[in-house]
Amino acid sequence: MKIIYFTIIVFFFSCSKPIEDKCFIDKMNTEDVVIQVEDSQSYTLKQILAENPNYLEITNLTTYRDFKTDRTEFRLPIAEFGEKGKTTETGNTIFDEKFSDQFICFAKQNSGDTLYGLGMNGLGYWLLKIENNKPSVYFLGLSPNLYYFNKIQRNPIVEGDYLHIEGSLVKIDNPIDRGGYKNYSVIEDGKLFKIKLKDLIQDSDQDGYNDIFENSFGLNPHEKDTDGDGINDFEDKNPMFRSSDNKFTRLYNQLVSDTFVGAEKLDYEFQVYQTDCEYFHQINPPQKILFVPEDKKKQTYYTKVADIIEETISPIQKNKKNPNSFYIYKAGAFYKNDYSADYENGKWVLKVVGGYVI
């Protein structure tokens, strides 16, 4: 027992400094906190083709619907992705019903007892399937920052053993304008993106998320409980890390809790944060959450090229005059809130003390 106790003590002190370094700062960096997209802007055609996923085939079309035409007719603001029930076509009621309005749906296909469609949400592109009234969802792992799928597909998207999608290779000129639009320009038009259905639907650990999804976001595709907390990844609100309950996890938990009503029931809607803070990692959130490492070398290919982070929550600044008083901020593309956080009688009291709205 003494040996185990000593090991725990050594482990505690060895871990305390990294937690201190990653979760606390001496002074807030109030500059450059607006969410930006960096890597995807500099991608060239050569880089995209060299680094595209090995399950993806890209061929050239001789006749095609070009990016400019399709984009002009179906220009969707980012804000619409947060408005439930918005779709790009009429007649999507069954998709909205079966998938709880979690996707903007397009390119529908009716094949006997099976309905197919492409879906898009804050994480990216998905294949939606309703077979004998049973819904299934498969993440494609192709970032909208690089791959544009035409909203009008001239041919069936599922044919034989393949998913076929017509579109273009694109880049972002300006991540988000004031109206909430992503501004793209075309790198090369007339592309056919092909994925074997067998590769797309593969779910090695049978946890409910396809392997492409888990590889894209750093989950373990061969273990249905990535963090080993006894909860299946599909059911786990925080599938990457075990949740714990302490003073500072409760602070972060309180800051991510102001989400829309019903988010806790959605299986494919995630909040994504970039942080190495263990207190933040260990929260027990009301809605699903994923984390991206701060070090780009530790990020997956998908999280490097996709702008899936809509909000950031800072490390904690201590108040040298009061050990129970702290400062922290929360920021998005068009806003920033500075908070004082006081720990009183076992609870956090948050007050907005500054910030801006653009």
Image: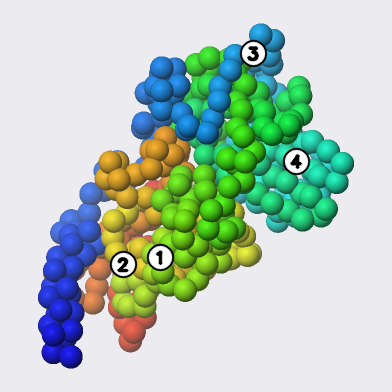
- The answer to whether residue 232 is visible is yes
Circle 3 is placed at which residue position? 61
Q: Evaluate if marks 2 and 3 touch, with contact meaning CB atoms under 8 Å apart.
A: no
Q: Do callouts 2 and 1 mark residues in contact (Cβ within 8 Å)?
A: no
Please report whichever mark, 1 or 4, sits nearer to the chain's N-terminal start.
Answer: 4
144 vs 186: above or below: below
* Mark-to-mark CA distance, 2 and 3: 50 Å
Identified at 37% across, 50% down, the residue is: 292
Looking at the image, is 352 positioned above or below residue 109? below
Q: Nearer the viewer, residue 248 or 117?
A: 117
Horizontal and vertical percent position of residue 242: 39, 69
Which numbered disc, 2 or 1, marks the residue closer to the eye? 1
**Relative horizontal placement of residue 295, taking residue 112 as reference (left or right):** left
Q: Quadrant of residue 8?
A: bottom left
Amino acid type indicated by mark 4: Tyr
Measured in 3D between alpha carbons, the distance from the residue under mark 1 to the one under mark 4, in whole angstroms, is: 33 Å
**Which circle's residue, 2 or 1, is located before the other in the chain?**
1
Of residues 300 and 16, which is closer to you in this image?
300
Q: Look at the numbered disc 1 and give the secondary structure of its residue.
A: loop
Q: Which residue is mark 2?
A: 279
User: Looking at this view, is 161 or 345 the one in front?
Assistant: 161
Q: Quadrant of residue 118?
A: top right
Distance from disc 3 to disc 1, alpha carbons, whole Å, reads: 44 Å
Residue with the mark numbered 1: 227
Question: Which residue carries the number 4 mark?
Answer: 116
Looking at the rendered structure, the kind of residue marked 3 is Leu
